[in-house]
Structure formats: structure tokens, C-alpha cells
Image (cartoon, helix red, strand yellow):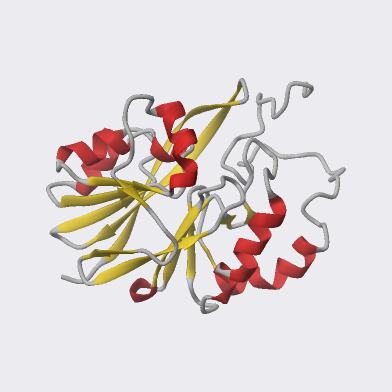
Amino acid sequence: MTARIERVVTEGVVDIDGTEHKVENNTWIVGDDDEVIVIDAARDADKILEQVGEREVLAVICTAGLPDHVGASIEVASRDEAVVALHPKDKPLWRETWSETWPDIDMEDDGVFEVADVQLDVMETPGVTPGGVSLYCEGLGAVFTGKALQADGPGKLGGEYPALADQLTSIGGRLFTLPGETRILAAHGDEVTVGDLEPHFDDWVSGSLTRVDTEPADDGPLTDGTKISGIRLGPGDE
């Protein structure tokens, strides 16, 4: 069977440093009519498994250890006794959601997962989290970037860049080395291509991401999937 990519969008609330954030997440399903791998089982296992149907789940891969990337991982994996994979540097984050269990697989750079007739190559892309990874599928012309890179640029956590230099190094050194037509399928928002975003890289490096924006914000999603309306991004925000 020919592999394909499917998307499930879920909504929920995550707590970051004591502040609740409304988040929309993309869960990606890669596989064929017989077997799949689930990427970032954020929440709502029932909705994810409804999309999976009777196909066998081989693995649940988490691109980060954050709650909105791992929240449904155990339930989705347990149905078919699938393995859960996470980079070891994000294990402390994982334990904030799953305090009594660990992932089955410690992912490493250049690791490989196979499903249907394609493979997913692990690329370390830290920045938003220390153990953030992306998954490149050459056969489907796509890279699953988690929070590292999204349609409007580098992803954030709670409206901030935890380690922007590391993140830009990941983007420039790994993601922007991929073919320009490669689809960027992130944990939040719509898809774009490497070619759409690569021309903006020099601006990001020169500081455009951290300049103060004096324009009023709209009610759309932030780069990390949070919504502006009614949400405080820091203790001092009103």
C-alpha cells in the first residue's frame, strides 16, 4: 500500500509556568491502509483513534515532551501495544504529564522509523525544548517539525523563545538544508514549504523575531498555537 499523511486537529488547555493557554494541536498520522505511526498524540485519544480506525499503530512519536505533545500518547499506544518514542533530553518534561511511566524508546539523531513503504528520519531540532526533534520523510516530501518551525516562523512556548539561538541553529543547519518543495507539517497551524520560509531566515537571525511589535494583535493563533483572546502570556500581562 502507498503511504499517506493525515491530520487530526484537537483543542485543549496547557499550563505553562502557572498560566493556562488555549492550544490547537496537529496530530499527524503516517501510514497506509494497514499500519500507521502517530506523531504528537496531543490529546483526545478517541478522536485520534477514530481517524486511525482498525489500522495497527506501530509507534507514537513525540517531537517534544510538552503536555500538548504527549497528552494522549499512552492511551493511543496502548490500544495496539505500540511503542512511545521521545528524545531523552525531554524526559523531565514528559514526567510532568506522565509521572509514573517512561517512553519506550529514546530517540537519537539520525534514528529511523519505518511504516508502510516509507521511513521517518529523526533530526534533532532543539530550541523550544532541549530534546525537540523533527521527522523527515523523503518518500512523502514532508518534514514534521513539532514546535521548531511553523507556518509563520520559529515556534514559541507561551509566547516566548526559550532558546532562540539553538532554535535558529536547528532551523538553518537542519531544516533549511532540505529541498525547497518539502512540506513543513508542524504541531500547530497550517502547512508551508521550506522554500516559503527559507528567504526569511536572514531576517530572523538579524533580530526581527525579538523586535517589539507596536501593532495591535488580532485574535488569531500565536506561533505556538495559543490564542490571544483572554490569555495572559506572563504574570505581568493584563
Q: Is residue 177 above or below residue 237?
A: below
Q: Position of residue 4 (x, y in %)?
A: 28, 65
Side (left or right) of 237 relative to 1 = right
Q: Position of residue 16 (x, y in %)?
A: 59, 28
Decide which of 2, 108 is in the foreground and name it: 108
Quarter holding residue 36: bottom left
Side (left or right) of 22 relative to 63 = right
User: What residue is shown at x 68% (from left), y 48% (from top)?
Assistant: 163
User: What residue is shown at x 20% (from left), y 66% (from top)?
Assistant: 116
Q: Position of residue 128 (x, y in %)?
A: 60, 46
Side (left or right) of 20 relative to 103 = right
Q: Is residue 140 above or below residue 204?
A: below
User: What residue is shown at x 61% (from left), y 51% (from top)?
Assistant: 127
**Count the marks: how many?**
0
On the rendered image, what quadrant is the C terminus found in?
Answer: top right
User: What residue is shown at x 33% (from left), y 25% (from top)?
Assistant: 100
On the rendered image, what quadrant is the N terminus found in?
Answer: bottom left
Q: Is residue 124 above or below residue 117?
A: above
Decide which of 199, 74 is in the foreground and name it: 74
